[in-house]
Image (cartoon, rainbow, N blue to C red):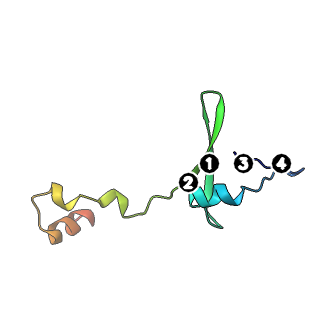
């Protein structure tokens, strides 16, 4: 179990063992999620702008060129 102290500014340092276990690096964002009356620290994983297109080509009966034209509104 790891613990830390809240500063007068409301800041905390996440212990190294926790950062390593969560894969946190400088600049990463985290979220505090309330769950059953407790707060859970979660790594905020940003979605890539390409994630919404994963599997898109496999769902269509169109050529890649036709899909690009459709996406461009032509």
How far apart are labels 2 and 3 at the CA level? 20 Å
Local crowd size for mark 1, using a 10 Å CA cut-off: few (<14), some (14–19), many (≥20)? few
Pointer 3 residue: 2
Say above or below: 26 vs 45.
Answer: below
Label 4, secondary structure: give it.
Answer: loop
For marks 2 and 1, the one nearer the N-term is 1
Whether label 2 touches label 3, CB < 8 Å: no
For marks 1 and 3, the one nearer the N-term is 3
Give the label, 2 or 3, closer to the camera. Answer: 3
Which residue is most to the bottom? 65
Which residue is most to the left? 61
Instruction: Please name the residue shown 58% across and 56% down the image.
Output: 21
How far apart are labels 4 and 2 at the CA level? 21 Å
Q: In the rendered view, does 48 fall on the left or right side of 2?
A: left
How far apart are labels 1 and 3 at the CA level? 18 Å
Label 1, secondary structure: give it.
Answer: strand
Instruction: Please name the residue shown 15% across and 67% down the image.
Output: 66
Say above or below: 3 vs 47.
Answer: above
For marks 2 and 3, the one nearer the N-term is 3
Pointer 4 residue: 6
Q: Which mark is residue 44?
A: 2
How far apart are labels 4 and 3 at the CA level? 14 Å
Q: Quadrant of residue 63?
A: bottom left
């Amino acid at each position: 179990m790891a613990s830390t102290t809240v500063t007068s500014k409301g800041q905390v340092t996440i212990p190294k063992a926790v950062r390593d276990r969560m894969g946190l690096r400088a600049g990463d964002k985290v979220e505090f999620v309330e769950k059953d009356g407790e707060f859970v620290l979660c790594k905020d994983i940003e979605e890539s702008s390409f994630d919404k297109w994963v599997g898109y080509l496999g769902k269509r009966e169109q050529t890649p060129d036709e899909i690009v034209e459709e996406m461009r509104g032509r």
